[in-house]
Each structure stands twice: as structure tokens, then as C-alpha cells.
Amino acid sequence: MQTTLTELTQKKDLFSLPSEVTYLNCSYMAPLLKSVEEAGIIGLRKKQLPTQYSHYEFFEEVDHVRKLFSQLTNIDDYQRVAILPAVSYGMAIVAKNLRIHSGNNIVVAGEQFPSNVYSWRKKVAEANAELRTIAAPETFESRGEQWNEKLLEAIDNQTCMVAIAHTHWADGTRFNLKALRKRTREVGALLVVDGTQSVGSMPFDVAEIQPDALICAGYKCLMGPYGITLGYFSEYFDQGNPLEEGWVTRNHSEDFSNLVNYQDQYQTKAIRYDMGERSNFILIPMMGKALEVVLEWQPEQIQKYCRSISMTAIKKLSALGFWVEKESYRGHHLFGVRIPEKLSLDKLQNTLEQAKIVVSVRGRSMRVSPHVYNEEQDLNRLVACLQNLL
């Protein structure tokens, strides 16, 4: 059932956010939906009597999460979704199976989130290869457009992978994944995407983009709990080696009575990459419930709603001397606000704290990330606070 923009205008009652707090920081961590919290409580209580655990909790419930994530991102085969503990874990899987040689290079964006950098630093050092970090343009005129152009220019015949976010975690800059995919195909390189700050709040179509891997932490735009990440892995990884040698990722693991008949062969496709104890009886039902809600809301509608409540505030901020990226190069659920030099950062943070307005300050930028629990007055409250400071 499709939801409409009107239906997405009053969702705060589905959360437990205190009325006196203006929470504009979903990119830090999404607040738990009451329904997701309840799913976790039910899962917790099952441990009171472990006989309640069945084949369903170990296998079918996990596959239900894979199927929901596949539906959200248009993955045609749910067995290409792995259950992971963190983005760093997913990127480590990619690094372990990446074919890289001396003289090759890996391209990343400047000031990328560390979980999508450290694995590549180690990998290029071991292979005598190069990590090409493409910094953001120093000018703010057409910044997003220029940054995307610089990334495309950095890819050459020695590039073996581009590892990048869909939207930059610090300022919301949107990277042109379709153009990057086209260029990486021309040189035979992989495209690995960190979708943590976008997937769930912004449409993402795996069939359209065709990334080689897509890794998404569950606790932000997917509205899930902390400690679970979902990862898509393409055919490139079908015969790869996992980080762990667990029992549940081996063939015939569904037969508990025959587990000591050890199997050398892994489960099919991305299931081989599942973390140990993947059937977490608290986190899995929480993640499943969160994905059901996000699918009901629809990422496209979430984008429209966030735009509807933020556009007036952004115009006012621009008039006050703050800088925000052009609409065509950022998401509506996450945008950076460049702070004028005349404004003291300490005073800004103290004032926001006293006003109980929650955003993230990164250098001289302020990251604002609204969601469906916000209203236009929340953004206006932020603008009024900044206006008073100036």
C-alpha cells in the first residue's frame, strides 16, 4: 500500500521523543519507533524460556529481513543480502576479496567516514597500490558538481575500485553513482557504496545503479537498532572468502542434528558472509519491523516530506549568510550548513544546547538531518536561534 505525502506529515507520535527537544539529527542516530522498541522487548522476553526459539528465529526470520531489504533497494535475489554487525565488517569482506595489484589505485572521497577508509589504507599498503583521496573543492560555487567531476577524472585504467558513500556523511553532498558506475565499468573497476546516510530516506535502486557491494548500517535511515548492518554483494563475491568460519553459513546448517558432519562448502551467494550469531533474537525482529515501516512510508515520500519542511528554512539561512549546497547535489533528509566566520562555534553549540536543538557540528559546518518526526516549525526554531546569535 502506497502512502501519500499527507500521511507523512504527522509521525512524531510513533516515537518517544520528548516534546521539549528539537531533534534534527537522524544522521547521527535515528530514534526508535515505538513499534521497533516493542519488537525488541518481545525478543528479549523470549530468552526467559529458550524453548520458545525455533527454526523460524534461526532461519526464516533472518530471511524475512533479507527480503524486506531487497524490496526496499530493488535487489532481485534476497540471498545476495548478508547480515553484518557494522559497515566496517562489510568493507573488510570487500577488502579480503578484492583483486588488487601493484600500481593499482582505489578512489575515495575526501573526509569520507572512517569505516569506508581504513580497510582501503591497509589494502593498498599491502599491495603497493595507491589510495586516491579526492578532496572537496575549496570554493562553494557549484561545489557538489565540481566534486563529482573531480571524482570521475580521478578514475583511470589502474583504478580497481571506487569506494564511496551515496551522500557524504558530514554535509549531505550527493554523489552521482550512475556516472561513477558508468566510468568504473569502462575501466573494469568495482563500485562499492556505503548507503548508511541515504538508504531508507532516499530512493536507491540496486538494479539501476548496479553496485558491486552496498553496505548500510541499520540504526540511521533504516530506523533500526544499533548493532546490525545489511550488505548486498554482487556476483563478483559469489565464490569469495568470509571473515568468519561459522556454522550457520555452511551448507545444510538448517539440520541441527547433523552439524558435526562438517561441511566445507558455504551457503549460497552473500549468505556465506553472515556474521556469527546472525540470528540475534532481539536485533533481527527490530530490524524487520523497522524495514516494514520504512517500506510503508517509502523513501521517495520521505524525501518529499523533508523537502517540504526544510525549504523555507534553507532560504532564510541563505539570506542570513549561511551556505547550503544546491538542491540538485544534496539530499533533503541531510544537508550541511556552512557557518559564517563571524559566528563563534563555542557560542553556537552552547546556544543550541540551551535551546535543546540537536544537530551535529562538524568543523565550520552544521549537519542538519530531519525526518518524518519533525515539522516545519522545528526547522524554523533552528533558524530563529541562529538569527538571534548573529
Image: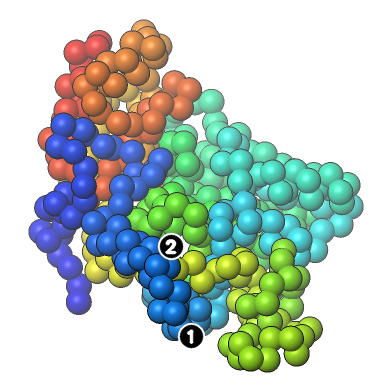
Closer to the camera: disc 2 or disc 1? Answer: 1
Say above or below: 239 vs 13: below
Q: Position of residue 255 (x, y in %)?
A: 61, 91
Q: Quadrant of the N terminus?
A: bottom left
Left or right of 379: which side holds 285? right
**Mark 2: which amino acid?**
Leu
The residue under the point 45% across, 52% down is 226
For disc 1, the marked residue is 55
Left or right of 293: which side holds 224? right
Residue reaching furthest to the front: 49
For disc 2, the marked residue is 283
Q: How many marks?
A: 2
Q: Position of residue 384 (x, y in %)?
A: 17, 22
Report whether residue 73 is seen: no
**Mark 1: which amino acid?**
His
Badge 2: how crowded within 10 Å, few (<14), some, or many (20+)?
Answer: many
The residue under the point 52% across, 39% down is 146
